[in-house]
Amino acid sequence: MKPLKPLKKTEIFNFSIGDFGINLNFQLLGFFLAYFYTDVFGISPWHASFIFLIARAWDAINDPLMGYLADRSRNKWGTYKPYIFWGAIPLNLILLACFSVPEISDSMRVAYCYFTYILHGMIFTAVGLSYSAVGTLITQDQQERAKISTMRMFFAVVVVITIVGSYVTPFVNSQPIVIEFIGIELLTLNGPQFKDEAEGWFNVALIFGIISTAILFYTALTTKERVNEPVQKYELKDLPKIVFGNDALLILSASMFFNTAIWVIQNAVSFYYFKYVVGIESLQTIFFQWMLPANIIGVFLTPILTARLGKKNVFIIGSLIVFAVNIIRHFIPVPTSEAYTLFIGLSMIGSSCMMFCSICQWGMVPDTIEYGHWKTGIRSEGIPLSFFSFMQKLAMSFAGFFALQVLAFTGYEANTELSESAISGIKWLYNIIPGLFSLACLVTLFYYKLGVKQYDQVLSDLNNKG
């Protein structure tokens, strides 16, 4: 195989901005769907928790089948790009359905949520794993993959989470949207006035869906699959070998499960935390605006640190600091409108280090593709990435299920003055539980052995065979 030309900056940008489109959809669900189900749609936490959990049972079948189909299809656009292009509109239409409140009976509401959430997971698999698979076919250079991962996380985390965490809530509640940076007010916008919260959520989903669709179209049309791999010829019976014969994939997927559970639980309960524990909903907006510079610092430092220490070691360091921050934050006073400096400061450190983890995690995934090819003799982008996607969605659903079960167990009742046990449950979900997941992620990473030298040897062996 001839060496590929270095990627142009525009090529890195054109592909990476696709994660902005995917995460406008993905993060809106991760942040607010649990709250929407319980406090807007009127479903009990117990029912809502099983919606998240049962959806993943179907994904155990759907995700590998989607990977199998994607690997074996090709047209003039490429192997995976068509799924991004043609899946963009359905993905965001079903997002709109997830944040709609139809006039139906209570039992039908639960069925409606099951249907829309499961369907969203199926379409998200087609788009998300195809997007990640295209990333493995743009370049095989580790440093270029690190650059792509860094820019992807800038769009996915720095930009999207700032928007979702800071501006969605005031928009939905028809409040002024105050744009700040490091505590300095830059601009105040007055959004539309909605008749109720349900109408606000529908309009947020509509706006996000339109932007997401346009960006995914742009990425599909401007990105080229440069690595010329033949259409895969493996059979369905080879799926277990492709997945379970790839120890690097299994270990990285396990660490990703724990790392995803951290932010899903925190994001899912953040609205509950500021509404019921802090008692000042507006502090959530201030909180996420302070996380913007923290995440920018994380994006800036990650490639510098990985060049010196390697992606695995930076991932471990990030996980260790995130663990420490969450445990310490649990024992400091609850923030108030006058005193939240220590709370914000600790959170900024943790947020920067979560960027280390997210960037390294996605930068390491493509390496496991070549490793699996080298170890099993079967080349597949779709199956490893569908497994990784399944584990990510499993983590999201488990975290959502776990958080909602804790709320139900501790006696949470929406829009009431909560009991001490319910308040305590939210506090533990916001700090201690994510800290323990970060510790589990750290321990798992010690078993990951695919370093720079081993990967270079894998790539050399594959090229010599080719």
Image (cartoon, rainbow, N blue to C red):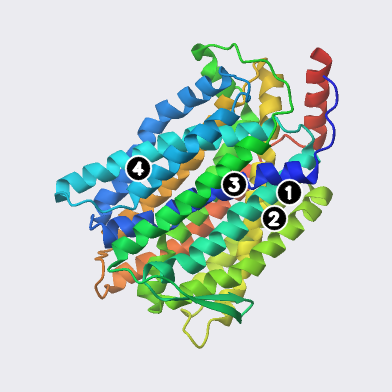
Q: Which residue is mark 3?
A: 19
Q: Say what amino acid the circle numbered 2 marks.
A: Ile
Q: Label 1 to label 2, Cα distance in Å?
A: 6 Å
- Look at discs 1 and 4 and give the one toward the viewer: 4
Between discs 2 and 4, the one toward the N terminus: 4
Q: Label 2 to label 4, Cα distance in Å?
A: 35 Å
Q: Which residue is mark 4?
A: 117
Question: In the visual, does 255 lie left or right of 391?
Answer: right
| Disc 3 to disc 4: CB gap under 8 Å | no
Between discs 1 and 4, the one toward the N terminus: 4
Residue 438 point in image, percent of width and height: 56, 54
Task: Check the image and report above or below for 160 versus 327.
Answer: above
Q: Which residue is mark 2?
A: 317
- Look at discs 1 and 3 and give the one toward the viewer: 3
Q: Which residue is mark 1?
A: 313
| Disc 1 to disc 2: CB gap under 8 Å | yes
Q: Secondary structure at mark 3?
A: helix
Q: Say what amino acid the circle numbered 1 marks.
A: Asn
Q: Say what amino acid the circle numbered 4 marks.
A: Tyr
- Look at discs 2 and 3 and give the one toward the viewer: 3
What residue do we see at 71% from left, 47% from top?
13
Q: Secondary structure at mark 1?
A: helix
- Look at discs 2 and 4 and give the one toward the viewer: 4
Dot 4 surroundings within 10 Å: few (below 14), some, or many (20 or more)?
some
The quadrant the N terminus occupies is top right
Residue 391's label in the rendered image is none
Residue most toward the left? Answer: 105
